[in-house]
Image (spheres, grey):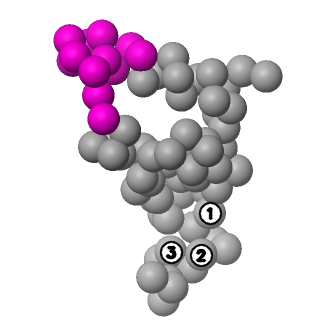
Amino acid sequence: MAGKPYRPIYEEAFWLAEIAAGRPLDKSRVLAIGDSVRTDATGAAWFGLDLLFVTGSIHAAELDAFGKSDP
């Protein structure tokens, strides 16, 4: 299976980021950004990345992102 949340897509993206940076990168200094629990949050967790989760997108209604959201 290709794509998020599966490891090969994160390995490829990380490899491309290292090429662009011209040096090895430390996962602890990489932040994944996403709006989907199923793909973004799961993939980041499986690959060992911290995640900035965007609540005002596809999960906005269930998280009450524009009302009294739960931190």
Instruction: Tell me what residue is drawn at x 79 percent, y 22 percent.
Output: 1
Q: In x, y percent, where is residue 37? A: 64, 56
Instruction: Tell me what residue is drawn at x 33 percent, y 20 percent.
Output: 17
| Residue 53 painted magenta | no
Q: In x, y percent, where is residue 63? A: 59, 75
Marks 2 & 3, CB-CB < 8 Å contact: yes
Whether residue 68 is visible, yes or no, is yes
Between 26 and 65, the one nearer to me in the picture:
26
| Above-or-below relation of 63 to 3 | below
Q: CA distance from mark 3 to mark 1?
A: 8 Å
Q: In x, y percent, where is residue 22? A: 20, 12
Callout 2: SS: helix
Tell me the amino acid under the disc marked 2: Leu
Q: In x, y percent, where is residue 56? A: 48, 63
Marks 3 & 1, CB-CB < 8 Å contact: yes
Marks 2 & 1, CB-CB < 8 Å contact: yes
Chain part drawn in magenta: 15-26
Whether residue 36 is visible, yes or no, is no
Question: Label 3, on which residue?
Answer: 65
Q: Residues within 10 Å of mark 2 (few under 14, many from 20)?
A: some
Question: Label 2, on which residue?
Answer: 63
Indicate which disc residue 59 carries.
1
Tell me the amino acid under the disc marked 1: His
Callout 1: SS: loop
Quadrant holding the C terminus: bottom left
Between 68 and 19, the one nearer to me in the picture:
19
